[in-house]
Amino acid sequence: MAAGSDHGEAVLSVKDLNVRFRVPDGEVHAVCGVDMHVASGETVAIVGESGSGKSQSMMAAMGLLAANGWAEGAIHYRGRNLVGLSTRKLNHIRGEKITMIFQEPMTSLDPLYKVGRQLAEPLIHHSGMSRRQARQRAVELLDLVQIPEPGRRIDAYPHELSGGQRQRVMIAMALANDPDILIADEPTTALDVTIQAQILELLNELKDRLGMAIIFITHDLGIVRHMADRVYVMREGEVVEEGPMARVFTDPQHDYTRMLLAAEPTGHKPPVPETTPVLLSGEDLVVTFHTPGGFLSGETHDLKAVDRVSVTLRRGQTLGVVGESGSGKSTLGRALLRLLPIEGGIHFEDQDLTEVDMRKARHLRRELQLVFQDPFGSLSPRMTVGQIVTEGLLVHEPQLSAAERDRRAVEALKEVQLDPAMRNRYPHEFSGGQRQRIAIARTMILKPKVVVLDEPTSALDRSVQKEIVELLRGLQRAHDLSYIFISHDLAVVRAMADEVMVMKDGRVVEQGPTEAIFADPQELYTKALMAAALEGVVLDTGVQEMPAQA
């Protein structure tokens, strides 16, 4: 850190860092001449959109670049340059003095080993502890990161823990050897807002207690506002702005920083009149999953994922469905489209869908469509964009000629603001936001009346989220569409929906006009969601994070 800092001497200093990757058609210059410094006890945020180079900068510091990548420049940890160090020498620093936690703990934890064993390994390797000593220390670490019943949870497998608990295990693993620096790469993006706030609060507490520095890599400026002392803003591999958090947020100097700060979805959808005809409704809906009780037990347990929920969706209306993972919101959306077995009544216009064989009623499938969270997972990598967008026409309008299908594909791509000339490319050639536009075009080409949007923006950068929200609004106005918008991102829901339904444990705990719910929530659970999403704190609701499996 610069002289005179409140946080003291620099523990990590980056000077003229360049990161390059060798690819079939040349080289990609991912990080371009970056300078950074981090002091003991300081929280520094590195922010920017996907592809900005923020993660690769720190992967270079850890010596974790892909095999086709290399770093040039200097990365000094307490005066020692890490660039060019052998793996053996790096291993004395990473995992002990500099540690890293990643976005998705399920891909970082070995599913075949209990979490206690995974916690013990770095203690045995770096600290020379016996297995008994390492196990005792592992229990202490689980207690430190506030996992309940640590003596029992130490023998759990990763899949037996909730997402928040798995992330706490990753934090415990990172803290095992009392590091100087903790690098957190998007550690809360995959978590619900209340669990996200708990993890952020935990990291702040641990930083203050242990005196370590934290480098927070994120595209979420709300997190930066509550976590960081200083901020580096990166774009296309370069640092375009740096400074104290308060100054960067109140007086940004670079146009890109101003764009990021303005990228929060804004605006409000006016409610549709109560006289507007009801398009889709569900009465006392129940979805039950039958799960095995255990190995060779022969017993099954019934889980009510949706428990006596009623829904009314009017023409042109957007119903926002919010709640944490496991609340039943996605299950409800699929059930309304008759994609799951269901009890209760579902009516679309004047038809009772529970009495219709949906396999034969193709016209209903056309009018009731679904857009998924992950466009890359829902788009076939073997098909061109043109083939993907027109695939539904082969089923619903088989009489169309190839030329007519192609003409319709051009229209659909234009409507989602993509260049039709790109329709002969494949999904991997597009960004996340472009792939989501392709998924929306595939839906819109069928001219549906109801679209269920299941977390359609959660995997996207904030600026891209704003663009997708504006696109969906425009399509709704143009085609008088009705949306069921499922999300745990309340800022996006507030911008999209004119009515909000809050779900918990398969039930509706609160419902009403969007602005009324946001301005004056009545239920403690709703208040907790609002506080976690909008204020960065968690209210005491009596709601505790539960394991995925007891």
Image (cartoon, helix red, strand yellow):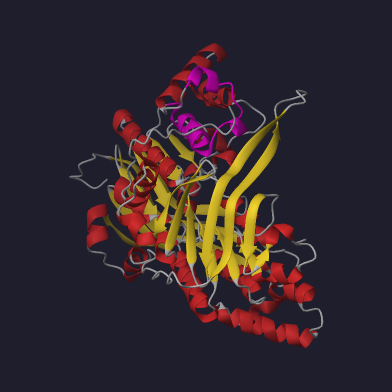
Q: Is residue 380 magenta?
A: no
Q: Say above or below: 465 vs 218.
A: below
Relative placement, left or right, of 51 versus 521 is right
Of residues 465 and 307, the one nearer the viewer is 307
Residue 474 drawn at (x, y percent): 48, 77
Of residues 93 and 519, the one nearer the viewer is 519
Q: Is residue 158 magenta?
A: yes
Relative placement, left or right, of 201 versus 107 is left
Picture residue at 30% right of the left edge, 47% below the top: 226
Relative placement, left or right, of 44 versus 145 is left
Quarter holding residue 251: bottom left
| Total marks in image | 0
Of residues 389 and 509, the one nearer the viewer is 509
Residue 32 drawn at (x, y percent): 44, 62
Magenta stretch: give its range: 149-177
Q: Main secondary structure of the magenta part?
A: helix
Q: Say above or below: 343 vs 420.
A: above
Residue 385 drawn at (x, y percent): 68, 73
Quadrant for the C terminus, please: top right
Residue 262 drawn at (x, y percent): 34, 67
Picture residue at 46% right of the left edge, 29% below the top: 172
Q: Say above or below: 251 vs 42.
A: below
Quadrant for the N terminus, please: top left
Q: Say above or below: 1 vs 396.
A: above
Q: Is residue 536 visible?
A: yes
Q: Is residue 78 visible?
A: no
